[in-house]
Image (cartoon, rainbow, N blue to C red):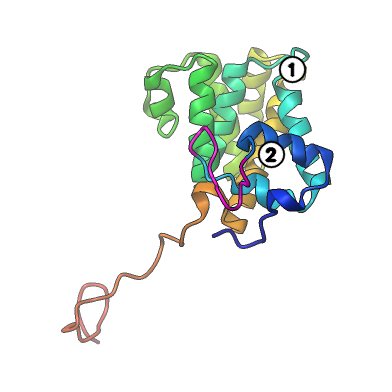
Amino acid sequence: MPRLRQVPGSEVTDPLVHSVYKQLFGDRDPVAEPGTDMGTPGHWWTVLAQTPHVLQQFVQLSRMYMSEKMHLDPVLRELGQTRAGWLNGCQFVYSQHCKMSRAVGLSETQIASIKEWQVADCFDDVQKIVLAYVDYLICQRGRVPDAVFAKLKDKLSEEAIIELTYVTCAYDGFSVLTKALRLEFDDRDDPVVEVAAPAAYGGGNFMGERD
């Protein structure tokens, strides 16, 4: 279960939360009967419902990046969000934006290759520089080499670069939040654990040699 309390439908008083619940869960209480049409448990919404002002910011961001005012190609936006989810090891963001990538026109081959884009031959030059930029945003926390940024400016407008940076960094944060609170598909134990040695193991170094 998520680490924080979920808000049952009977406790909702905020109009935004009520609207979100109605849209995603219909007449069901999402705590008693969890699940969305996309196959997610719905924890993201029921936990953030404790803070409608925070939930409102997420809803506004989603509406912003899908609006006609955006300069950024939706395909490039989804490459950024999906790659950010994968780099952060966030199952929820990665899984959801694989679906969004499909919706905006990325092929199954491209979606499957986002993990190893560096050796894939299914991305064009613009998509490759966007993916490279995203890697520096997430892995190097924004320390992007001048040569990479120069190529990005050669391919995208400054408005599109701002939008790409903003949305990708936002989903970097959402990935971290999702794992920290154990929401949705990230409600799981840390997979990196010690594997017990056989009972007969008597110690020594990793080669089995004793000092």
Task: Give the number of marks.
Answer: 2
Q: Quadrant of the C terminus?
A: bottom left
Task: Please tell me which of labels 2 and 1 falls first in the chain.
Answer: 2
The residue sitting at 37% across, 21% down in the picture is: 109
The residue sitting at 66% across, 26% down in the picture is: 149
User: Which residue bears the numbered disc 1?
Assistant: 67
Question: Magenta stretch mostly in which secondary structure?
Answer: loop
Tell whether position 36 is magenta: yes
User: Which residue bears the numbered disc 2?
Assistant: 21
* Side of 11 where 168 appears, left or right: left
- Residue 176 screen position, x and y as percent: 62, 50
Q: Which residues are magenta?
A: 28-39
Q: Of tags 2 and 1, which is closer to the observer? A: 2
**Observer-nearest of 140 and 19:** 19
Dividing the picture into quarters, in which one does residue 100 lie?
top right
- Residue 177 screen position, x and y as percent: 64, 51
Q: Quadrant of the N terminus?
A: bottom right
Q: Mark 2 near mark 1, Cβ–Cβ under 8 Å?
A: no
The residue sitting at 53% across, 42% down in the picture is: 35
